[in-house]
Every structure is written in C-alpha cells, then in structure tokens.
Image (spheres, rainbow, N blue to C red):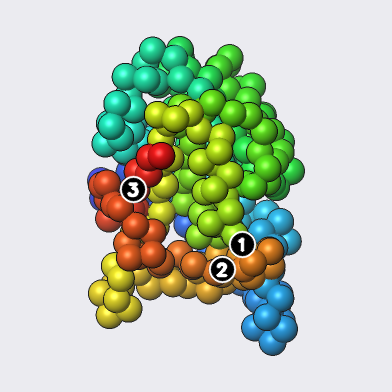
C-alpha cells in the first residue's frame, strides 16, 4: 500500500482514516427495508433500530477527527474554554454515543469532570467499557435523554455531530441552557455544510446527504416534534460559526 492508502485504510489514528465509514455504509444496506417503509409512512426509524454496524462505524469514523481536532483546535476556539478545563471544569457530552469525544477530552484535562449522556442504552454500555479500559477516573457515562439529562452548573455542554439527529433540538438546547452556569458555554459540532444546495454538491456533501437520508432524518422524524434538520443543515440554521474543518462546523453559544 502507498503511504496515502495506509493513511486511509490501515492507520486508525490517521485524520484521513475512512474504515469506519465503510462499517456505517454496510448498515445502510442492511436497514434499507426499514427506510423504504419509513418513506411510505413518514414515521421515521429510531436510532436504536439500526444495524449495530452503524454504531461501531460511527465510533470508528468520527474518532480520528476528534483525536485530531478536538483538543488542538475546537476547544481552544472557545472563549476561555481551555483555561477552565485545565483548572477543573464540569462537562457534559450530550448524545455521546460510544463516548469517543468524551474520552478524548477526559484524557487531555485530568482536573475536569466529564459525564457522557446518551439515550441509547447499548451505546452507553459500550462507552463505559471503553472508559474502564482507558483507566481514566474523571469520566463516566449515563443513559438519559437530551431534554432531561441530570445535573446543573456545567461549565461546558457539548453536542458532537448529533444535534441534527434529535427530534427537538430546540428543546435540547433550552434544557442545556438551564443546566449551564451563567458563564458556561454550549459547544455544537455539526457536519460541515453550506447554506445552498448547489454548494453542497461535492464528495463530502454527497456522503452526508446519503447518511442524512438513511439515518439522520428518519431518526429525527421518529421522535417528538421531528424537526428533521438533517446532516446538511448549514450555517444559516445552526447559527454563529466559530471555526470549521472540511467535515465539521463548530459553533459556540453563550448565555
């Protein structure tokens, strides 16, 4: 294999690693009958009813990006965020899935406390296994919904690549506002997208549109409200962009 091929297919820590995406793609073929039915009924397909290949694929696909960007670029882009984390902050990672993003932050900031919340029980169980294997003592994972996760006085509440999947993202952010300290920060990381359809007709946009059709939009429609932002919502809908990568929009919201 060439060095470029190794980076994409053989190095799990490479920022260009794409093997996780193929796990997730395989789930789309397994779940196609459910999506076809959802198109007919409009009822959507809950996240937890997808093939398990989607869950492990999501973990493997997003891990390189979080390892590369989260501590080095995204958190430093927040006003005063890193200094709080270094001194000791209370952080919630909402919709954490297998907890990759939570564990990356916990390893980088041992003085802070990290709690990952997700409504999908099997994902929470997997996250707790990974936490135990990591040996980190400042992180834990709990099963909870985005509109009633417990706790107050958080210095930072983060949503990594999940807000658009939620049935009521407005309600989720409102609950987070109540759970934040007065000087706390809400961090939103979402798939990169421009506001106009024509601007998203590129290799990255086409990939995200496909996953949005098969996973994200049906997941939102299966929940209350069902706003269905989709994975290509764009800056106009997500507001106030702080920084970006080729795959992500990163937004900071403050009280």
Circles 2, 1 touching at the beta carbon (< 8 Å): yes
At horizontal 57% and vertical 22% (from top left) the residue drawn is: 139
Q: Quadrant of the C terminus?
A: top left
The residue carrying mark 2 is 227
- Per the image, label 3 sits on a secondary structure element best described as strand
Residue holding disc 1: 167
Which is nearer the N-term, disc 2 or disc 1?
A: 1
* 198 left or right of 232 in image: left
- Tell me if residue 55 comes above or below residue 215 in the rendering: above
Q: Residues within 10 Å of mark 2 (few under 14, many from 20)?
A: some
Separation (CA) of disc 2 from disc 1: 6 Å
* Residue 82 visible in the current orientation: yes
User: Is 40 positioned to the left or the right of 84 in the image?
Assistant: right
Residue beneath label 3, please? 250
Whether 211 is drawn above or below 189: the answer is below
Q: Is residue 100 visible?
A: no
Q: Is residue 184 above or below residue 253?
A: above
């Amino acid at each position: 294999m060439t060095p470029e091929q190794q980076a994409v297919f053989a190095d799990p820590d490479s920022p260009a690693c794409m093997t996780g995406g193929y796990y997730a793609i395989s789930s789309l073929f397994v779940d196609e009958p459910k999506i076809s039915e959802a198109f007919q009924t409009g009822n959507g397909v809950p996240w937890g009813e997808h093939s398990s290949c989607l869950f492990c694929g999501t973990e493997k696909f997003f891990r390189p990006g979080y390892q590369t960007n989260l501590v080095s670029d995204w958190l430093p882009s927040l006003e005063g965020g890193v200094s709080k984390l270094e001194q000791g902050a209370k952080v919630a990672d909402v919709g954490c899935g297998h907890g990759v993003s939570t564990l990356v932050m916990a390893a980088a900031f041992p003085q802070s406390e990290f709690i990952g919340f997700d409504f999908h029980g099997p994902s929470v169980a997997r996250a707790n296994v990974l936490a135990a294997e990591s040996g980190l003592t400042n992180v834990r994972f709990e099963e909870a919904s985005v509109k009633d996760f417990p706790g107050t006085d958080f210095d930072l509440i983060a949503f990594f690549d999940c807000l658009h999947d939620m049935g009521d993202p407005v309600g989720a952010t409102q609950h987070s506002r109540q759970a934040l300290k007065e000087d706390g920060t809400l961090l939103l990381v979402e798939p990169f997208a421009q506001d106009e359809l024509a601007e998203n007709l590129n290799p990255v946009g086409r990939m995200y549109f496909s996953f949005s059709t098969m996973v994200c939009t049906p997941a939102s429609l299966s929940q209350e409200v069902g706003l269905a932002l989709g994975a290509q919502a764009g800056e106009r809908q997500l507001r106030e962009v702080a920084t970006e990568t080729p795959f992500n929009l990163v937004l900071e919201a403050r009280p």
